Amino acid sequence: MKIKKYYLTKNDCYKKGRKRKKTLGILRHDTGAGNKYLKRYIDDSKNLGKNKYKNHWNMPGVKKCVHFMIGLDKNGEIAIYQTLPLNYVCWGCGSGKKGSYNQSHIQYEILDDGYKDKEYFRKAMKAADWLDAYLCKKYHLSVNSITCHYDAYKKGYATNHNDIIKWLKTFGKNMNWVRLSVKKE
């Protein structure tokens, strides 16, 4: 797999440019939007196709941003886009009663298809496993540091969302399966 750098430089999070002091883990999200095409979130029309609604995240006023997005390019192939520098604080999981993993975790969105297509799920999770393995090596992280929005909420470090648990459960999987898959990768 390859990572395509395409920073969302017009996004408020990017423009704020706050630096993360430490990297303690990785947090997976899914968009919950039933749209697996990266053009929905990233305005790289040359490689992703045109977003006719102009509702991507590379504009002022968008109050969310993550380090990576995984989804389909204009050819229907899985792609990984890096949307923020890795040392930036992202705006991915909000805050919970104990604080926020935005301050300590690299975060990314996997674009879901409405939790229907098992083959797309397999390919998207394989790309996420590769990305997690890469990040674990780069930051000397254990696979046990990989979490999701829902688990971060339960621990008190995020808002109440059920991603990525709902998508995993749809196909009989869980976060332990994710960590084992990343370990194998």
Image (cartoon, rainbow, N blue to C red):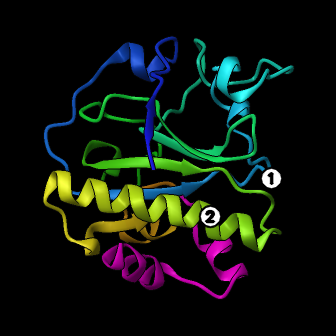
> Does 74 sit left or right of 181 as displayed?
right
Q: Amino acid at mark 1?
A: Gly
Q: What range of the chain is rendered magenta?
A: 160-185
Q: Position of residue 144 (x, y in %)?
A: 27, 75
Name the residue nearer the viewer: 127 or 58: 127
Note whether residue 114 is visible: yes
- In the figure, 64 relative to 59: above or below? below
Q: Secondary structure at mark 1?
A: loop
Figure quadrant of residue 82 = top left
Q: Is residue 155 left or right of residue 141?
A: right
In the displayed orientation, state which residue is furthest to the bottom: 172
Is residue 180 depicted above or below 137 in this figure?
below
Magenta stretch: helix, strand or loop mostly: helix
Residue 84 or 134: which is nearer the viewer?
134
User: Residue 156: image x %, image y %?
Assistant: 37, 64
Give residue 74's mark. Answer: none
Which label belongs to residue 34?
A: 1
Q: Is residue 183 magenta?
A: yes
Residue 37: x and y, percent?
74, 41
Residue 55: % across, % down: 75, 23
Query: What residue sits right under mark 2 in the picture?
Result: 123
Residue 52 lies left or right of residue 123; in this view the side is right
* Residue drawn where x is 68% and y is 47% of the image: 77
Amino acid type of the residue tagged 2 in the rendering? Lys
Relative depth, front residue between 104 and 108: 108
Residue at (52% x, 66% y) in the render: 126
Of callouts 2 and 1, the N-terminal one: 1
Q: Secondary structure at mark 2?
A: helix
Classed neighbour count for the residue bearing mark 1: other residues with Cα under 10 Å, few (<14), some (14–19), many (≥20): few
